[in-house]
Image (tube, rainbow, N blue to C red):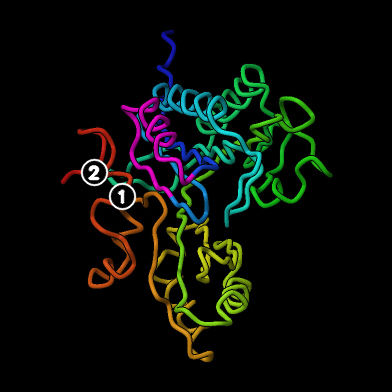
Amino acid sequence: MPRAPAPPVPDLECVVNVSEGRDDAALDLLAIVCDGVLADVHRDADHHRAVLTLAGPAPAVEAAARAVTAAAVARLHLDGHRGSHPRFGVVDVVPVVPLEMDPDGRLRPPAALDAAVGARDRFARWAADTLGLPCFLYGPLPGGGVRTLPEVRRGAFTGLAPDVGPAVPHPTAGACAVGARGFLVAYNLWLDDRPDGLALARTVAAEVRGPAVRTLGLDVGGRAQVSCNLVDPFAVGPEALYDEVRALLEPYGATIARCELVGLVPQAVRDAVTPARRDLLDLDAGATVEARLAPGRGAPG
């Protein structure tokens, strides 16, 4: 009896977070080595961080993730790094996301993370063996259970040992958190300029924080920011977050000065936003993963 064909391997997104946001020449080099699947680069000098979004066929995305990581470890040093965003590595976070399309060509929440877990584990083993980089896994774990990125940050090298690689940080590149997850939207809300801005941002961040939203209140270049990760953006998207933060600020006489999308969003997340508010929320038509995929692979139009 003939064997049934193996199910197709989904395309992947890999969002490489690099602890460098000021050296344009270095960031241009990193962009060049992942050309072909590079969907977006977001640079932030105050956070001293760049986010490179890779998207496309799984083999090409995995190869590009390795290439950009090798180039970053060779060129960048964590010594003396100062920035608003927490970090413990030159290549700080490398999450992998399966890209599954609905019949209309829009990305949907992945039904399973198997493809992302496989890519994550291959990347971590390669980074450990080739670069001597300690890697902490998050998402579904090989022995069962699930670990979150905040748990990695809290426990790395104290109560938590690397899953692969050396037991101590790389001398110049630190360590790397490598994840398998569904879609996440990184989104920043800037408060109006006020003396108590940082304290207020931290208060609001604590109020908003929950299972679907992770938050920090940060001082970014002298301005207060509520920095958010929408870990279930199909359930709680940028518009709902904006309205909740705005309501929490009103009793203090404070307002949101501007919004900032970091990276890209699935088309369905943007579609859920009231059309007249998309510019206000920094969600232009080109800000979707589908819009940046190679021609013929994304949503029509």
Nearer to us in this view, 285 or 58: 285
Q: Position of residue 38 (x, y in %)?
A: 35, 34
281 left or right of 163?
Answer: left
**Badge 2 is on which residue?**
299
Nearer to us in this view, 267 or 64: 64
Q: Examine the image and state in which quarter residue 284 appears.
A: bottom left
Mark identifier at residue 108:
none
Q: Are marks 1 and 2 in contact (CB under 8 Å)?
A: yes
Residue 59 in the image: above or below residue 45: above
Q: Position of residue 28 (x, y in %)?
A: 37, 34
Residue 125 in the image: above or below residue 189: above
The residue type indicated by label 2 comes to: Ala
Q: Examine the image and state in which quarter residue 40 appears.
A: top left
Tag 2's secondary structure?
loop
Q: CA distance from mark 1 to mark 2?
A: 10 Å
Q: Examine the image and state in which quarter residue 30 appears.
A: top left
Mark identifier at residue 288:
1
Range covered by the magenta-colored residues: 21-43
Q: Position of residue 169 (x, y in %)?
A: 73, 33
